[in-house]
Amino acid sequence: VTSGSGGGNENNESRRQDVFEIVSNVSNATLLQQTASVQNVAFEWVVQDTTLSPVRTNNNQKLMRRYALAVFYLSTGGMKQITTSNNGDSIFTVASSSSWTLDTNWLDPEVDECQWDFITCNDNQIIEGIDISNNNGLKGSLPDELEVLSTSLRFLSIESNRELTGTLPAGLYELSNLESL
């Protein structure tokens, strides 16, 4: 049983199902269930992030933002040691060095995403920008999950990251307020 900042208790399996239902609106359910996929690792991280509990009464927009940013971080070479567990039993541990040159506070459940390196938020703590142009260690590809930020993201700067590959994800076309890419 996990206890959240909202004062309620939530069964781990119930929380897992609730989070799955929420994030499967933006990620493929198969990827969410595929052990060690970036979507699965981000999903497991959000399940364990009790600062977002209880899920049923929480503002799910924050959960979705944290999930999308976790997928972005993991998809572009960011990695930290993440141990996921279910009722105290370890399922798997992902441990790798990050290719990011800076990643202060990323995936720290105790730190609001507005305090993560390269994230810019407005006065209402809504993400307006990601400027990762000076972090030349990014590699991999941009995930579709960034579409979660479609109503707020105004700029996304990824220049000078020569190891980013692939085409722009379809989700970026959903970023209706994007002014600069």
Image (cartoon, rainbow, N blue to C red):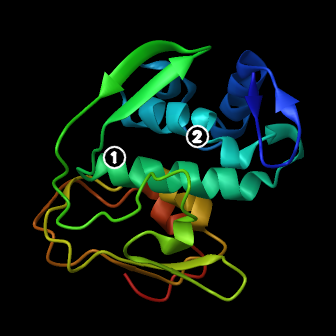
| Residue 100 on image: x %, y % | 20, 60
Q: Is residue 144 visible?
A: no
Q: Residues within 10 Å of mark 2 (few under 14, many from 20)?
A: many
Res. 147 image quadrant:
bottom right
Spatial CA distance of label 2 from label 1 is: 13 Å
Q: Amino acid at mark 2?
A: Val
For the C terminus, give its image quadrant: bottom left
- Residue drawn at (20%, 80%), measured in percent from left and top? 134
The residue indicated by pointer 1 is 74
| Residue 13 on image: x %, y % | 72, 16
Q: Of the residues tagged 2 and 1, which is closer to the observer?
A: 2
Q: Amino acid at mark 1?
A: Leu
Q: Earlier in the sequence, mark 2 or mark 1?
A: 2
Which residue is outermost to the top?
A: 89
Q: Residues within 10 Å of mark 1 (few under 14, many from 20)?
A: many
Q: Is residue 55 visible?
A: yes
Nearer-the-camera pick, 137 or 113: 113
Q: Is residue 2 above or below residue 91?
A: below
Q: Is residue 80 left or right of residue 14?
A: left
What is the number of the mark on residue 46? 2
| Residue 144 on image: x %, y % | 46, 52
- Residue drawn at (52%, 30%), measured in percent from left and top? 44
| Residue 82 on image: x %, y % | 38, 34
Q: Is residue 52 above or below residue 30?
A: below
- Residue drawn at (51%, 27%), measured in percent from left and top? 32
For the N terminus, give its image quadrant: top right
CB atoms at circles 2 and 1 under 8 Å apart? no
